[in-house]
Image (cartoon, grey):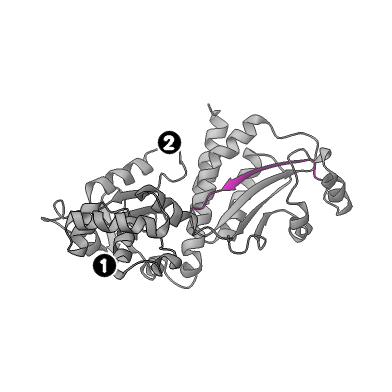
Amino acid sequence: MDLTAREQALLLELTQVLSSSLDLTEVLGRAQGTLARLLPCDYAALCVSRPERPGDYEWMGLGAPGILFAHYPELAGVDLELKRSLLYLRCRELGLPLEHVMAVLLDLRQDWHGGFTLYREHTLPFSEREQALLDDLTPYLTNTVRNCLLFGNEATRGDLLDALFRHRGAECVVMDPPEHEKLRTPGATDLLRRWYPEELKANDARLPQELREHLTRLRAPGTKRVPGVDTWTRSGGKHDLKVTFVELPEQRGNRPWVLVLQECSRAIPMPEAWRQKLSRREVEVVQGVLSNWTNETIAEDLGLTLNTVKTHLRNIFPKLGIESRTDLLYQAAWRQKPG
């Protein structure tokens, strides 16, 4: 979408505000005025919920009345044109004279999911252009909510960089772009050395080139954020290296970035019922398949010949009522679904 000069200025101002703090309430408060100029509305609301508690929403409002949050489960099925719904009348009874609603989902790519909604009490409907502007803003909203949920609680208890060092299950490298590295967690060097052995052989204190290049692209003026583009994944034989790039609030005149490094297994958990049907060695072979390893990698890992691995698989399939390697992966993944 071609933006006017005014829209570009407001969008730039808003995206800078959204990365100005890791306190979500503080960020939303700062963003309220600019958002109202970009997308005029009477009030807005952000909700975040964990999948294990789908009806238990944490609400943050930008001028939204508390009665809206209290009755949200009752109103959640509202469609965009409230006048066509019985809930329109219910909103009137509750003192919520809503005429129009515009909303987007936030794909947080963690344990959370959420949504952001704008409300109008007057009769002017939201336009297609306003919906497109909100869609353009959605990746920035998503990044803000995700970063605040990941680091906000820790950061409020002390220095932000110290909080990053305490972040469980990951190593971190903090950069003052484009090239200056401020600090890294103790295990970051070993992790990067494992994944970039040739490149870091001469200088393991330097960030690998492809990560530096990706950071440069994210920082380029006018770069439009796209969901997922700030996560870099490098595939290995048995694991993946996942690198999440997080833009931090301004500190002492600079805006640092942190690279959160996580070594992830690609394995699908094995259904417990399968273990009861297989020998110990067959279980190990299935675990290799569920890790997306090739037969050659499984053989090397278990100290077997390639033919022995193939023989185990031919015996495993009928025991589990499975026809192929692909079917094994599908059935294991399907059994992980709740319910």
Mark carried by residue 222: 2
Left or right: 166 in relation to 45: left
What residue span does the magenta drawing correspond to?
98-109
Crowdedness near tag 1: few (<14), some (14–19) or many (≥20) residues, C-alpha within 10 Å: few
Q: Earlier in the sequence, mark 2 or mark 1?
A: 1
Residue 104 inside the magenta-drawn segment: yes
Where does label 1 land, which residue?
187
Q: Are marks 2 and 1 in contact (CB under 8 Å)?
A: no
Amino acid carrying label 1: it is Gly
Q: Left or right: where does residue 298 sit relative to residue 223?
A: left
In the image shown, does 90 or 282 lie closer to the viewer? 282
**Residue appearing at x 73%, y 39% in the figure:** 80
Label 2 environment density (alpha carbons within 10 Å; few <14, some 14–19, many ≥20): few
Number of numbered labels in the structure image: 2
The residue positioned 45% from the left and 38% from the top of the image is 224
Q: Residue at x 80, y 45 (%)?
A: 98
Q: Quadrant of residue 42?
A: top right
Q: Is residue 268 left or right of residue 300?
A: right
Residue kind at label 2, given as amino acid type: Gly
> What is the residue that sits farthest to the left in this orientation?
202
Where residue 166 appears, as percent x and y from the top left, is 38, 71
Give the alpha-carbon distance from disc 2 to disc 1, as whole Å: 34 Å
Q: 291 and 40: which one is in front?
A: 291
Tell me if residue 80 comes above or below residue 201 in the rendering: above
Q: Secondary structure at mark 1?
A: loop
Q: Residue at x 51, y 44 (%)?
A: 139
Dot 2: what SS? loop
Name the quadrant of the C terminus: bottom right
Q: Is 207 on the left or on the right of 77, as rendered?
A: left
> Foreground mark, 2 or 1?
1
Residue 16 position within the rendered picture, expressed as x and y whole percent measured from the top left: 49, 47
